[in-house]
Image: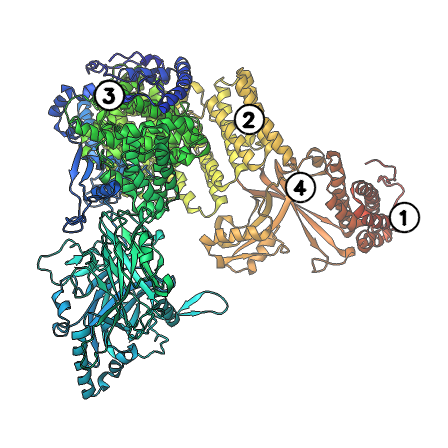
Amino acid sequence: MADPGADLDPRHDQDERHSSDPDDDPPAAAAPASGNLDVPAAAGARKMSSASPSGQPPTRAWAKMRSSFSQAKRVQTEVVEEVHESHPREALIGDVLKSLHVEKTLTDKKIADEVKSHPELKAMFVVAEDDVAVEEQPRQLRTVTTSVTDDVDVSNAEPFVQEAIRLFNQPWTRVHKKSLEYGSYANLLTDSSPPSLPAEDSVDFDGATAPPGLDEHVLRNFNEQEEAKRRTALAQKLMSHQPLFTVYDGPRNPVLCARGNPQAYDDQNCMRVLFEAEKLEFAVGNFEPMFVSVAIYDVIRRVKVTESFNFDLNSDGVISLLPERKAGRTPKSTARAAIFPVERPSPDLFLAVKVEKIQSGQENAAAVEPYMKGSGLRPKDKEKLVAQVNVNAQRLGKFLQPFAHGYLPLFDDNGRLHCGKATRIQLTRSKNDLGDDSFCDLVSKDFYLKNKGNEARSRRSVNATPLLERKLLPCDFVVNCRQLKPNEEIPGCVTSTLLPVIPFPPETKQVTREMQAFTDKQEASAPLSEYMHTFYFYPISVNLNRHPNSSSRNVALKIRLLPDDEDPHAPGLPVCYGRSSQPDFCTEIITSSTYHQTRPWFFNEEVKIRLPANVCNSHHLVVHFYHLACQQKRKKDVQVENELGFAVIPLFEDGRIVPDDQHARPVSITYCQHYMKPSAVDKLKYVDGGKQVFTYRTRLESSIYSQEYNLNAFLHVASLPTTQEIQLTRSLNGLGDVDGFTQLRFFPLLANMLLHTLRSHTEDEVAKNTLFSLARVLGTVSSLFPTKMNTEQTPVLQTYLAYLLDDHAAAHRTDDDALPLHLAVMRAWLAALPERKKYCLDSVYKQSLFFFDVISKSLTLKLAREKSLTAAGSRANRIDKDTLQELDTLLAAVCEEVYRWHVGNQKLARRLNRSVSLFFRDLFGILDRDVVIQMVTKYVCSIDPTNRDPVHVATKFECLTIICGYEHFLLINIPFEYPIEDVSKLFSQWWHQHPLIGLLLAEVDQCLSSENASIRQTAIRALRDILWKHDKDPRFADPLAKQRIANCFFPLIQIIASHHEIFDEAPEVEKSDWAVSLLFVLRHCSRAKLLRHWWRNDTQKSLVSFLRALFTCTSVFRQPVMEYESSFVILSVLEDFMGDNKKPISLRENPLIRPVFDVLQGLLDKAQPASFLLAAFDTIRWFINSFPETLFSFPNTTYCGELCYQLLRNTNINNAQIRSRAGSLIWLLIQVNFAQRQSIARMKLQATIAISRLAKSQSTEYAHLRKVMVDVTNMAMKKHGRDGLGAEIAGIVQRLNKVVDDSVRIAEFKFDPEMTQDLYYDVSVGYVDSPDLRVTWLENLANYHKAQKNFDEAAECELLIAALVTQYLFKAGLSQGTGLPLCTTDFESVAPNVDSEPKLPDVPPEKAAEEGVYQSDVFGIAGLLKRLKSASAYFKMGGRYEACLDVLVPFADYQQASRDYVKLGSVFSEMQQVCQTLVNTAGSRLFGNYYRVALVGERWGELNETEYIYKEKNEVLFVQVIKDRLVAQFGQKYGADRLEMLPNTLQLNTAADRKAFLATANKEKNYFQIVTVRPYFTKAELEDRLTPYERNHNIRHFMYETPFTKSTKAHGELSEQWKRKTILTTDRPFPYVKTRLLVTERKVIELSPIENAAELIEEKIHALQEILNAKHDGNPDLKSLQQNLQGTVLPMVNAGPMAIADIFLKNWKDYPAEHVLHLRACMKQLLVTCRFALALNKSQITAEQNDFQEACEDGYATISAALEPIFQEAAKAGKSSSTASLTESDDF
């Protein structure tokens, strides 16, 4: 393919390539580009056409928007052109966009040919024609019939009502995407079965079936053809392994923002309680019809929360007393079970029960009295009662009166249903004045107590007896309650509007009724999805006391709905829901009546009415009031119903149904026609002068009419055929005052009407206002359902878009001139952009996904109508250019907004970005894919082209992740198997062939070079998730499909290789993402056509980088299965690499061999399963036979030794097959070494070094290794006899066994760090004749010290190695003129022991290879510098900065001699930092502490009667600390109870002392003695050692003091106190390579009492002089100064110096003259020093310390005066003494 931009690839090296066999793959033919948008490469706003789309004349907003964007367009174009000039990457983007050919390729015959050749790729290349299709689905109904029944009359209804009816009745218009399930990243979160290793790795091979001796597989002759087959088989076997991402255990937090499959609206998602009435039996008997109504009340809020359920439990015989009732019975009206929905379970919810009976003409108390007697009622009285019931039924049967009431608590305090099966409800007599409010008060009184101190209510136990002073009816009222499960449907159920619910068997006789919940605004959960238009009327009370008719008692109400006011007595409409044992719908409802009450109250009196859909102003309720003549007068037929008047209840006022509230109306006692007209007021007469004596409450439950005035006003105005702009704008603004609950309930209708307005009104202001109003509605509705960022849209919006939105929104009339919905939205959006300050655009951006979804669905529906959505062929002409132009302009503007909002509102910018990304995915399914790819590329590239801002980078990769998750993402990237045309232009070629993957990889490449870890991690995590998603896609499970996926991402190998240094240093989590992405591509890509072709033709520099990245992958994973799978991928790739690069690897000093070997080492360094080790051993076998020169001929290489180490390590594992194979490879190494060099010197050396490295392991068991060595020896004897090569091999084995023995001994003393150090050192000295081995053991010792944090000793080990290398370099003539040390004496300043160490063997360097010495890479200038660098670092960690500087000096000399001034500057910079640290820590550094440890007792063995100096870390300040450590340490071997510490006063200095002690000691004890010692210096030494460092470096003399007296006591009077000084000398100076040194010399000095006194005075002088000397540094320690002055001159404590003078100087004749004179001189020097100290203190103190200064000066004068005569007396001790007297003029 022609690639004009490939030479501009900034990432590729132009190094000279190494030659290799060329690949035979033919080049791919170039494909012509399809048509594309004429746009610049980077995203920017396109210049607008002068005409608007679809030939519509441009509006003012259109012109304004075009003008606004023209300037932005010019600026962006200038920026893009500038970027193109300076950034080749941008030029490449432009070239890619111009040459797009996706659409042409996807409709080309090549696709069919590819599928025909590879049927397993059908899912990748073939998309069904109806993959995106528009389907019209019947609505899924809960009910048998639609909620809009045939009797719903919409004639003369308002247009918006007709639209609402259409919504409830229309089929769903859905855009069906067959492959939608494959477009989500959610499968990354699904947990599969836990990964496990292969079965063979769980088998213990260490059994009888293990092969004896060495493995014949390894020993047989090597065959290159067989090895080639084995490598191929390994690569093929890899395909059967577990998928990498299946076993990958990295963090899973993918972008879940994807299309879902929303559910239809469901308003049944609350708790539902099934109520069943089982029986109601009275003790007196059931002979009178009783009617019950129940409803749920919230007694605290005093509101009714459900409608009433009316039922009766009357038998057929009892109900036959009421013929009308019996005749009207239906299955629905005889229901005894109901389902109560509960939105918010609460202990405040109670089931209210009302029982009514036939009107008896008695007050309630009298009517209930016989029932209260129960079984105690006399038979005669019962007969009378039954007879009276029969009479009442005949005359008053259709009138009821309140009989009893009760209640049932429903929920406990935790919201759990309290009542259950066979729950009994207690009933009590109804009161005359019982209403809804008084009922709630009654329950509150029974179940709540108010605390006097606060308003908190404490609920009584629901099992407690209520506080009822009222008498209970003797009856048995039993009900059953249970909570229904979610989605549980009860057969034979009807809705609250009496529609049968599926399933509803035809033979259903027992019906269950659903009750309507009265939802609060805070409890709305879904929009109204079914037609409902129900009006509830609740009489509260009526006051007829002032009625002209004195017989205005026993009042009953009749309620009817009339369509007009022609006649108040006209029959009502049959819209009243019947009550128990009544027809389903009635023309009127009669309330109960209370006997002898002129002002009755009504409790739970509910009239339920189905309003007509075309309800209008003329519809109203008429309430007639009747006086009931309850008593039958003798011999006179009295009319029962006597009308008292009527009240008119208007239903429709101000464009809405009367609001839910309490109302009052007057009662008219006269009648006239057209009584609702204003003129009728004068014709009517009212009770009590027209006062509103009738109170009632109403409630509307409607899905077509709202109680909100502003909502109804908008719906009305928006549905008018013609509307003035100002009127529409006002109604739009009014929507802001509609509460969220109402907006949610009417959301589908409201959204439809707003979209209709957007389509039909193209005026600028109206369109913009409509857009913002819709955005505000969307925001309000969304705010009711807080969602996570991943969800983006609430389910309410998703469902509307998926089911209800169609391209005929609000299609209640024909709009021939209306804009298509997608154009309407885009134009309104663009029109508002220039005026963002005036309009709050953030509301639009928050809901941007909704608007993009509207555009997408509208476009899809348009294409479906035009029958082009599923048409085969190119999509190039599906959408007109003007629409595309407008769409591109909108996306450019949105991109600018994303950038803008990132500054002020990142969350909003992220939401907008996600919306655009999902919109792109939708467009891929319907539009020209080349055009969409151009849009995507421009959008992505315009978001921070430099990728420097972490926030912008996160935005960009979130967009890419969403787009790359598109279900047909691979298809639009043309996943053909393209060959590599030119390795140097690989990336450019791939971008042309796979445009979106190329874009993704380009962005990843740029981000991976960032120093910001968050930017890198964002990029690589996105790429990882994309690969992970496609790897887990079940459509692409076939290996060939996975190969095509990996092929598309093949340049990732080059990208990661080019950033391998960053990869290696990245944090662990980030590193694992790099590794798994790289390994996925390596595992599945085409080896022959891509991978092997690439490394055969790329530069060695690139290949080295690739191998370094591969090496990093070997140590990334910790989870065993992932480690196992990744290791197999790396091994397989490495084998192919070595096979294809055999010639370069065989060349001396080729840069490939080291990284190749590192990768192999990295694989073997880990604990691997047996199956992998066997495969790796096959690779090693091939390597040994293929690269013998590399292993045995190249000088100063350690490849052989590294292989030996890995093989020897595996000879000691618990798997016989692995041991046998490893031993065989060791034998093979020996054989190849001999064949290559006619000597096995290298194997002898390297094998010994390798097994020495094993000493670092703490294992003491080497039986397996020894057995393998025996097998090797036997094989040598068998093949070569006991002489010659056989004897040499036996010598190697013997030497290896010796190292093993040393290792075992070291392991035995692992409890004793000091002994372990001794053993490491002794073993290293034992290899004096083998410098390489000696260095190896010194390295082991250094590493041991490092682990123990003995940094000084680790540095000494490194310096000892450096001294050995220095000797070698000098011998070889390599150090002259380099500035490096020339001999070991150059190290004396920092390593005083080096010169006394054994020297190198006398082997000339030119014979080193022949003798098998100096083969380690340590022996060279680089090795020396490395050791010095390590020593410097250790000294720095140990706080020995002076030594660090001494070690850095040779570095500076070397760089200066090399004229490498950059590195010289770095050395000086480091030295400066060290000096600064040294200055900053002056006076605060602490060096090690020293202790003398003596071991006595036969149980110590060879340690008995030894004496050591232990160097401890500076935190070990007390003897007790080291004692505890030694007890714990030695207790592991000898037992803590056997250890005993001896006191310091016990003399163990001489052999005689120790012998005397042991003679009486317990033989079963281990005795030890610990004494704190300090470095000892002579006065001459102290003059040279001025600093703390110098007094703690190169020290081998130590001293401790022991006080004693000539008696048996240790302490006595000052005149008899002696002191013994013990000076110990070690065999080496500290610091050394060990922390414990043997004491070799001892010197004891005893001081007499006067000498001891003089030393005490000298110590005080020395302490003061230290402080005085510090004055020159400007930092005198005043606290220490004052403490020392206080202890010397203050009268209260000056007894010390004065006592010494009194005892020794006054009695000078009793002591030697020289001691007296010395003590006198010391005392005089103390006074002079005190005088200077007082002067210093006076110059430093503040005024607060003047009292202390004066006290000290007075004390000084007193002690001076007292000592002067004593000094004069003591001077007589000898005038000839050489001790000079000090005068006050002496200068200090």
Left or right position of 920 against 1758 = left
Tags 3 and 2 in contact by the CB under 8 Å rule? Answer: no
Q: Which mark is residue 1576?
A: 4
Distance between the Cα atoms at labels 1 and 2?
58 Å
Q: CA distance from mark 3 to mark 1?
A: 120 Å
Sooner in the amino-acid sequence: mark 3 or mark 1: 3
Mark whose residue sits in front, 3 or 1: 3
Q: Mark 1 or 2 closer to N-term?
A: 2
| Amino acid at circle 1 | Glu
Q: Nearer the viewer, mark 4 or mark 1?
A: 1
Question: Dot 4 surroundings within 10 Å: few (below 14), some, or many (20 or more)?
Answer: some
Tell me if residue 485 comes above or below residue 1216 in the rendering: below
First in residue order: circle 4 vs circle 1 = 4
Q: Is residue 1334 left or right of residue 927?
A: right
- Residue identifier under label 1: 1764
Please state which of residues 1295 and 211 is positioned toward the viewer in this rendering: 211
Between 1652 and 1339, which is closer to the camera in this rendering? 1339
